Image: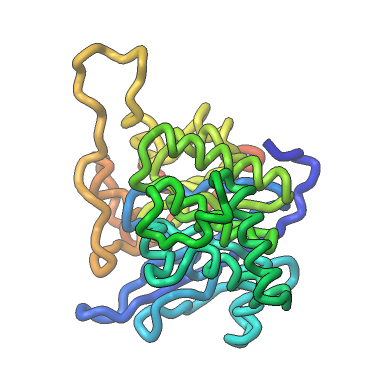
Amino acid sequence: MRDKQDSQALLKVRDLSVSFTTDEGEVEALDRVSFDIARGEILGLVGESGCGKSVSAFSVMRLLPRPMGRITNGKILLDTKDLLTLTKEEIRKIRGKEIGMIFQEPMNALNPVKKIGEQIAEVFLLHQGVSHRQALDLAIGMLDEVGISDPANRALEYPHQLSGGMRQRVVIAMALACKPKLIIADEPTTALDVTVQAQILDLLQNLQKKNGSSILLITHDLGVIAENCDQVCVMYAGRIVERASVQTLFKNPIHAYTRGLMASIPRMDGIPKNKLMTIPGIVPALSQLDQGCRFAPRSGLSHPVNSLQRRPPFKEVASGHWVEACPVCTKI
């Protein structure tokens, strides 16, 4: 875990709102999302599918699908640069060099008709101005660094010739090629078996420590959060409902949604053959979101009408522990 004395933020996201144009009209996918990532820190972003985790990541990278998706409000500061004010050419220079992204599905992230070595070499050609031969040598070096055996021959293969775990290592090699300040890992272990998942997470942590990078780790797995992160933001329906250090959040979850997530984790000391706890219902559609407490329909708790009409304030309930303070859904 990082040294807490270095609290200077590398990335600052402030009041980020994102909308999409759909057949049902304009819908809001993110509603004033704010978080910081300090230098050398791993921040976990956790929540169910559809809560806005990947939209947050693609907003930082300026990769929202256009013209359907657009950022309607907020700032995204990398050091002192507001990424939302940069031109397309300026943001291209930052992607891959200062911010690397590990995409959720490596088979979709890799070009199926280009050799692995050529795809990694592109990063060096774009950002370091080296020759093609030098770029290929650097690509082979990156394959070796991420633990792929016989990297010179693997560099000549196509994505379909590699296993899922090896493809994920290739994507990590591409993301870390230029030793970026910030790494965004969007569900980096999706569809991998448990053993390979552990290897990938260990690899990511080791490379992060070696390069001193910060990581935004997006996942729905609280176990991954507990093992790898320093800070955690819990997202629900386009909002961050709780934010704290990992130790604080697991010891004292305050929001009803966070407590529901914690209760759904299988326990070794639980009652044998007992049903797992679940949160009833599903994340509401973007066109059906309340202005107030969005977890109200699934909480099983009786909410006053005014709590559904007005957004609860985001309060610091203890040092570094913030929560969307719905008077019904929070244990304050």
In depth, the one of 80 and 259 nearer the eye is: 80
Work out whether residue 76 can be spotted: no
Question: Which residue occupies the foreground of this view, 149 or 110?
Answer: 149
Q: How many numbered marks are there?
A: 0
Question: Quick check: 120 above or below 275?
Answer: below
x then y, percent, for residue 281: 20, 46
Q: Is residue 200 above or below residue 262?
A: below
Q: Is residue 192 left or right of residue 181?
A: left
x then y, percent, for residue 144: 62, 49
Q: Quadrant of residue 269?
A: top left
Q: Residue at x 31, y 15 (%)?
A: 270
Render colour scheme: rainbow
Q: Position of residue 1 (x, y in %)?
A: 67, 36
Of residues 239 and 178, the one drawn nearer to the viewer in this rendering: 178
Q: Is 96 left or right of 191, judged from the image as shown?
A: right
Q: Is residue 271 above or below residue 306?
A: above
Residue at 58 percent across and 55 percent down: it is: 152
> What is the x, y in percent for residue 87?
61, 87
Residue 60 placement, left or right of 269:
right
**Residue at image point 36% right, 37% down:** 193
Q: Farthest front residue?
A: 153
At horizontal 25% and vertical 58% (from top left) the residue drawn is 284
Is residue 150 at all visible to an observer of this figure?
A: yes
